[in-house]
Image: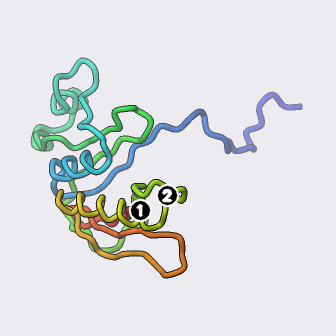
């Protein structure tokens, strides 16, 4: 028996994975404002020992001309959900997202379909006042499901159900 078998590839994680979601955009401050309101998140404070993110990135070695963009990341105040970083990119969004957020606002199937429709539409209306655009209603007679498709201020698709 060999003490270490290099031919076997590691398939299990080293531990619980911590991750962030990265969304390419043109205006991180605008996206932070919208998504903090949509998700109940907050602007993520800089790491301990730094008074702001620019100071932190300066310490990392990021060039000065890449600093000063304002808030660009948000975090769940409970620490349970992943943080979101809005990364500035030059190119515009050109195709449909391959991944999108589904926001739960209906209360689930324990709530009547009519009440779920009311709750989902009310949340869609709120997010539209914040800069989203309603795109589509997903409802089919006889199906116990109701959702609304929207786009955030930079055109990224998301749903409320």
Mark 1 lies on residue: 115
How many marks are shown on the rendered structure? Answer: 2
Q: What residue sits 34% from the left and 50% below the top?
A: 22
Residue 91 place in picture, x, y as percent: 21, 65
Q: What residue sits 42% from the left and 55% below the top?
A: 104
Place residue 56 in its image quadrant: top left
Residue 102 place in picture, x, y as percent: 42, 59
Place residue 41 in its image quadrant: top left
**Tag 1's secondary structure?**
helix
Residue 95 place in picture, x, y as percent: 32, 74
Quadrant where the C terminus lies?
Answer: bottom left
Place residue 138 in its image quadrant: bottom left
Residue 52 vs residue 98: left or right?
A: left
Residue 16 place in picture, x, y as percent: 56, 35
Is label 1 in contact with label 2 (beta carbons under 8 Å)?
yes
Any mark on residue 111, and which? Answer: 2
Could you say which is closer to the camera, residue 116 or residue 155? 116
* Distance (Cα) linking label 1 and label 2: 6 Å
Residue 148 vs residue 90: left or right?
A: right
Could you say which is closer to the camera, residue 150 or residue 14? 150
Q: What residue sits 38% from the left and 64% below the top?
A: 159
Could you say which is closer to the camera, residue 84 or residue 135? 135
Quadrant where the N terminus lies?
Answer: top right
- Characterize the local packing of mark 1: few (<14), some (14-19) or many (20 or more) Cα atoms within 10 angstroms: few
């Amino acid at each position: 028996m060999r003490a270490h078998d290099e031919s076997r590839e590691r398939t299990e994680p080293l531990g619980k994975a911590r991750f962030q979601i990265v969304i390419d955009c043109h205006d991180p401050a605008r996206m932070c404002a919208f998504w903090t309101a949509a998700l109940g998140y907050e602007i993520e404070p800089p790491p301990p020992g730094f008074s702001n993110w620019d100071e932190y990135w300066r310490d990392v070695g990021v060039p000065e001309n890449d600093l000063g963009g304002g808030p660009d990341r948000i975090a769940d105040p409970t620490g349970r959900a992943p943080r979101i970083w809005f990364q500035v990119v030059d190119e515009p969004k050109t195709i449909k997202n391959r991944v999108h957020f589904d926001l739960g606002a209906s209360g689930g199937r324990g709530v009547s379909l009519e009440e779920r429709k009311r709750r989902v539409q009310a949340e869609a209306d709120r997010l539209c006042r914040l800069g989203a655009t309603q795109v589509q209603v997903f409802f089919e007679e006889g199906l116990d499901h109701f959702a609304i498709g929207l786009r955030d201020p930079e055109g990224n698709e998301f749903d409320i159900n």
